[in-house]
Amino acid sequence: MKFFIYAMSILVLLLFSLPLLSLFIVLEDTANSPLNRQLDQQQMSSIENMLIEYDPRYLFNSNDQLIELNETESNALLLYFSQQLNSGSFEWLSDSSMLVELLPDSAKLSGSFAIKPNLFGSYLNFEASFEQANGSLFLQEIRLGEFTIPRFILRPFLNYSQQELAKNNNYLLLNSVLASIKRIEIKENYLGLTVNWGTVDINLISEQARRLLIDQTTYNNLITYQRHLISVLNEVPDASRSISLNVLLAPLFSYALENDGDPREENQAIFLILSCYLLDELDIEDLVGSDALETTITRPLRITLESRDDLPRHMIASAAIAAYANNDLANMLSIYKEVQDSRSYSGFSFSDITANQIGSRMGELASTNPNAALQLQRFFSEMELEIDYMPLVGRPDGISEAEFIAQYGNRNSEAYLNRMESIKNTIELLPIFQDL
């Protein structure tokens, strides 16, 4: 996967080098690569699955990991990375696009930059050719428009670009990740990367990821509600080892109701902070960096609904994902939740589905419009009973795949669809959704 960071370094290299390039490059009137592209649902699912499969935190006995991608997956990642490029640093850049072609022992990276129109043209098109040798990848040629950078100036050109990149904090991340690649293998429609995660500055990566995902308003809200969550937990009697989710929801939303900020952003912060607290895979440090040290929760408490600790995790994680819909944070939270769900040994569970669907509805209400967001705050600040927002589902009801097939056949069967419709109707009758 880190080949794409290498590709992004070439992209950023070209961006920083534009002052030098403009001395002898004529811009063009058309783009060679399609611009304004968006990831479709299949591509997003593919990326999320790759992130889960290759998460370095779950390696055992070795820091080395083999990452294998085909050309379709490679280009989905390139599109994702290009969308993450902080174009705010380049006022003249309005869009960018990259595509990779995987060939036997070589690769070709091509793309286009859409820039502010000027007398010389509106697009900078480029091609970069790489060759594989002895497990490494070597840049052989760069074409910019109709101009090929001669070999005798390619190395000075790269040295100049690296000096410019070194002045930018984002290059520290690129340099760290590039150093982690031990071996590269390229075949037709195949890219294999052997990565040693032990060489990567994980703290640096976390900090860079936080900058991409967390704006200043979100950051301030997360710190505020994390501190308030700590104060709520500190008020729980020392003898208590288990508390209802109500004990957290009521004071957090009451606090939000007293604030003058955007209620949608306040609600998002609450669900995200609670997700960090409830999900083992997601830490507050992932979101706010080193500033989380003074706000870390150390007291162990079991948070429950109907005396079950799985239901709050399903509900709150789903609420956070829905609250941040159309935001990169939603994708990140989906990944953490899928990891959490995949590690459950309870099997298929209708009660888990119920909690997920309630959480999704809550998240939508929390962030759809200011009025609904305020109403949700009022509801949770006044509610007393779990049954006001979670129907009685009883003991864990997980069933194996064989049991599911025996009872329901498949997810298109009438029996299964009737069960799902019954869950939906039960949810709609809950006081939380009646009041709102």
Image (cartoon, rainbow, N blue to C red):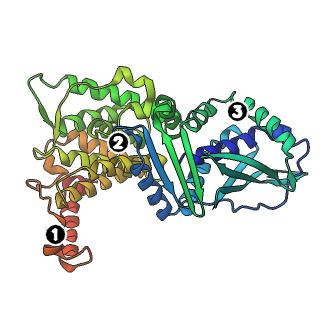
Q: Which residue is mark 1?
A: 402
Q: Count neighbours of disc 3 (C-alpha within 10 A) and say few if under 14, some if 14 to 19, many if 20 or more.
A: many
Residue 404 at x, y percent in the picture: 17, 69
Q: Is residue 124 left or right of residue 269?
A: right
Using the rendered image of the protein, determine whether residue 84 is visible from the camera's viewpoint: no
Q: Count neighbours of disc 1 (C-alpha within 10 A) and say few if under 14, some if 14 to 19, many if 20 or more.
A: few
Q: Amino acid at mark 2?
A: Tyr
Q: Which residue is mark 3?
A: 165
> Is disc 3 in contact with disc 1, using a CB cutoff of under 8 Å?
no
Mark number, residue 58? 2
| Residue depicted at 81% across the width and 52% down the height | 143
Quarter containing the C terminus: bottom left
Using the rendered image of the protein, determine whether residue 211 is visible from the camera's viewpoint: yes
Residue 180 at x, y percent in the picture: 53, 37
Dot placed on the residue nearer the N-terminal end, 2 or 1: 2
**Furthest residue toward top:** 294
